[in-house]
Amino acid sequence: MINNKPTYLTVKDHSVSGEEFQLLHNVALDMLETFPQPQGEKLSEYYKSEDYISHTDAKRNLFEKVYHLVRTISLKRKLKLINSFQSKEKTLLDIGCGTGNFLEIAKNNNWNVVGVEPNEQARAIANSKTNNSVFDIQHLETLNENSFDVITLWHVLEHLPDLEMHVKLFKHLLKPNGTLVIAVPNFKSYDAQHYKNFWAAYDVPRHLWHFSKTSIEKLFHEEQLKLVKILPMKFDAYYVSLLSEKYKSGFMNPIKAFWVGWRSNLNGNRSKEFSSHIYVLKSNNN
């Protein structure tokens, strides 16, 4: 026991440092917390890898080519989702926008976009696609209250320190009828249970938090943000399984990874616990 929270798993940082971290179970929220959590500049050191794929547009190998093909399909689905919201001014804030692909497709479909991305190299690429609409993380503090119809975080919430402060900030920036879209891995999924400490979506210590449906609902309920819809991200089961196979056996083993990913989605159809979920939350003060 540490900080009165039981250890759920001990997990290795497979992609950068090789260090081990504990996942502590916050029972009240049904959420896992990475321990210890690196702070400030120390945390940024764990992102210094050429393989950190959200910071690159590279297509150096088959894996990256497949990733970008799937990303193209996913971008169209994300656009369809935000277009389904009733947004007159169509103002969009994408936090942790990486190289700006989602912002680019939204901008090309008449959304007024702002992005935030802490990585300087990724931010430069994103700005080349969005007419310089992407800023460093400090820019969030300069944005006006009730500014955005839609705020999106695609696999970003798990990276953010001071979780409660950020949840309050999202509420502050959303319009009264605004929509918050959060995509995060789900540690209750079949592939997470199958791979255990080799599950790539733990990605410690870059992922500081590991969410369940219960934890998302409880966290945002505190700020009057109501969970209205949960959508599966079925491609994630295959992508995560490929990386998990690499961590477990030293190579990606695509046949076995595909089998585990397929089993995970099949199980998800029954249990509603997929490898990753998209959570749609509405501001609840109207």
Image: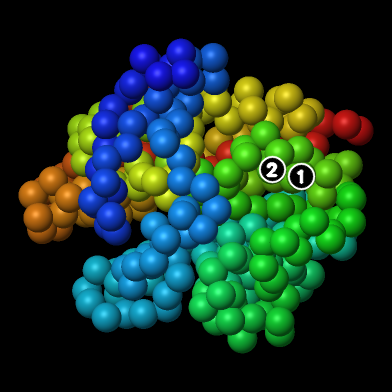
Label annotation for residue 51: none
Position of 36 compared to 75: left or right?
left
- Check the picture and name the quadrant holding the N terminus: top left
Measuring 10% from the left and 58% from the top, which residue is drawn there? 251
Measuring 16% from the left and 54% from the top, which residue is drawn there? 246
Dot 1 amino acid type: Leu
- Residue 175: x and y, percent? 86, 47
Measuring 58% from the left and 39% from the top, which residue is drawn there? 279
Reading the image, the residue beneath label 2 is 166
Q: Are marks 2 and 1 in contact (CB under 8 Å)?
A: yes
Q: Nearer the viewer, residue 1 or 54?
A: 1
Label 2 Cα crowd, 10 Å radius (few <14 / some 14-19 / many 20+): few
Give the quadrant of residue 35: top left
In 3D space, how far apart are the residues under numbered discs 2 and 1 (Cα atoms)? Answer: 5 Å
Q: Nearer the viewer, residue 116 or 89?
A: 116
Dot 2 amino acid type: His
Position of 119 compared to 60: left or right?
right
Reading the image, the residue beneath label 1 is 169
